[in-house]
Amino acid sequence: MTLLDLIDGLRLDRTRSAWSRSQTLPQSLAKLKGEIDECRDALDEGDPRALEEELGDILWSLLFALIVAGDEHGLSLERISATALSKLKYRKPWLYEAGRDLSLEEEAALWSKAKEREKTRTRTNGTADRTRPSSQPFSPREEDGLG
C-alpha cells in the first residue's frame, strides 16, 4: 500500500460514504487534533505499536481534512503539496544543493532569516511568494554567513 493508495481510498470514502460526505472541515480538524492527542499518549507510554497505529490515524485524518478542504474551499491536495514543497525548498535550500550538511546553529540561523524574509514580503506584497524558477534556486547569501 502506498500513500497514493490511501489518498485514493479516502477520496472514494468521501464520495461513497454518507457519513464521510457529512463531515465538515472544522469537524475534520477536531478529529485530527484528537488523533494527535492519542499519539502523544502512545509516545508517553513508550509503546511502538500503538505509536505506529496513532501516526497512521494522524495521516488518515490529515489527508481526509485536506480532501474536505478541497470540497469546501476549492483547494487542491496537489497545490497544497506543491506549496509545502516550495516552502521546504525556500526555508532549507541547502538540502537541494551539493555541499556540506549544516550545523544545528547554522540551520536555525538560516531558518530564522528565511522566515523573516517571508514576513517582510507578506507585509509588502500581502503574500509570501516562495516560488522561484528552478534555474534560480534560493541559496544562502553572504550576509547569512554561509554564501
Image (tube, helix red, strand yellow):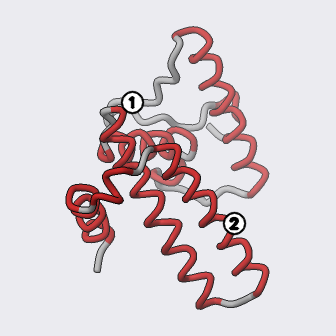
- Disc 1 versus disc 2: distance between alpha carbons? 37 Å
Q: Image height check: is 119 above or below 95?
A: above
N-terminal of the two: label 1 or label 2?
A: 2
Q: Quadrant of the C terminus?
A: top right
Is 15 in front, or is 36? 15
Locate residue 112: give its quadrant.
Answer: top right
- How many numbered marks are there? 2
Q: Position of residue 105 (x, y in %)?
A: 79, 51
Q: Image height check: is 102 above or below 93?
A: below
Which label is found at residue 30? Answer: none
* Label 2 element class: helix
CB contact under 8 Å: marks 1 and 2 = no
51 sits to left or right of 4: right
Q: Position of residue 109 (x, y in %)?
A: 75, 41
Residue to which mark 2 is pinned: 37
118 sits to left or right of 21: right
Which label is found at residue 132? Answer: 1
Instruction: Residue type at mark 2: give it.
Output: Asp
Q: Position of residue 145 (x, y in %)?
A: 72, 37
Instruction: Residue type at mark 1: give it.
Output: Arg
Residue that appears at 61% across and 31% down: 141
Disc number lying in front (1 or 2): 2
Is 27 in front, or is 142? 27
Is 83 in front, or is 146? 83
Residue that appears at 47% across and 51% down: 97
* Label 1 element class: loop
Is 36 in front, or is 112? 36
Residue that appears at 26% across and 62% down: 17
Residue that appears at 40% across and 49% down: 66
